[in-house]
Image (cartoon, helix red, strand yellow):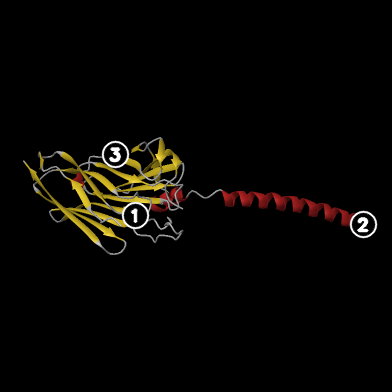
Amino acid sequence: MSKIKPRGKVPKKAAMDEIIEIKTLIRHPMHSGRMKDKDGKNIPKRIINKFLVKFNGKQVFGMDLEPSISTNPYIAFPFKAKESGTFDFEWNDDNGDKYTMSRKMDVS
Amino acid sequence: MKHQKMKIISRRNILYLIGGVASSALFTKFAIAKPNLALKRIKEISKSKFEEVDLFLDVPEIAENGNQVKVSFDIDSPMTKDEFVKTVYLLADGNPAPNVAKFSFTTDMGACSATTRMRLSKTQNVYLLAEYNNGKFAMTKSKVKVTIGGCGG
């Protein structure tokens, strides 16, 4: 199985009050619990069930994912730049794992 | 006399029988037609207090591969403390489970939009339900034709 790897695209610089777009992608199989492997056995359900975004420690965006979300979940959302700071992204796996990523942004 | 009475009863019985057959046929038809789980869920979330308005829900008209269907939405809202969209639900009525995703928005975002990719098992309707901070709900739907289904199995 491929390694789970989060990726994100946040503009490094933004103007004051500019609405930027943040794009994230995580490599994850998102087993819905309905698919079968080569031997015809059911692959147990294992998905990313929660995605959280914090900016300077404050939660700004959240998303609850269900099995109907595709493999390698791609999530894009807007953000209004008001101050420089750090984004903390967090993906929660069904098996209890957490994948995190941080990105910095400068606002001028 | 007795004989005639018997006849009447039997005729009535036949009527009952016909009625029974017709109603059971109706019931089986009802059982085959799956109830719309997505609409049921929307009514559960909003307590049936939703308005059907034209929100911007962008899904392809025809999806060749149901495994990766791009969905994006854009809801016109000032996103200020007095007026903002709190939660957005994405639902589908033809998938094994109606829930697809739930987005939690805050005023820091400045706009209410998002993009993701979803699975669609067959041709179906995709629903978008938005909850505003004042407790109002708005709903829109869009039909997607799916060539190859994408839910496995």
Secondary structure type for disc 1: loop
Q: Position of residue B2 (x, y in %)?
A: 92, 59
User: Spatial distance from mark 3 to mark 2, Cα to Cα?
Assistant: 76 Å
Name the residue tied to disc 2: B3
User: Spatial distance from mark 3 to mark 1, Cα to Cα?
Assistant: 26 Å
Q: What residue do we see at 19% from left, 47% from top?
A: A8
| Marker disc for residue A22 | none
Query: Which dot, 1 or 2, sits closer to the camera?
Result: 1
| Chain assignment, label 1 | A
Q: Position of residue B137 (x, y in %)?
A: 35, 45
The kind of residue on which mark 2 rests is His
Q: Position of residue B36 (x, y in %)?
A: 48, 48
The kind of residue on which mark 1 rests is Met
Q: Say yes or no: labels 1 and 2 on the same chain.
A: no
Name the residue tied to disc 3: B74
Q: Dividing the image into 4 quarters, which one contains the N terminus of chain B?
A: bottom right
Name the side, left or right, on which A85 lies relative to B3: left
Q: What residue do we see at 19% from left, 57% from top?
A: A100
Can you tell which quarter of the image residue A76 is in?
A: top left
Classed neighbour count for the residue bearing mark 2: other residues with Cα under 10 Å, few (<14), some (14–19), many (≥20):
few
Q: Is residue B26 visible?
A: yes
| Marker disc for residue A30 | 1
| Chain assignment, label 2 | B
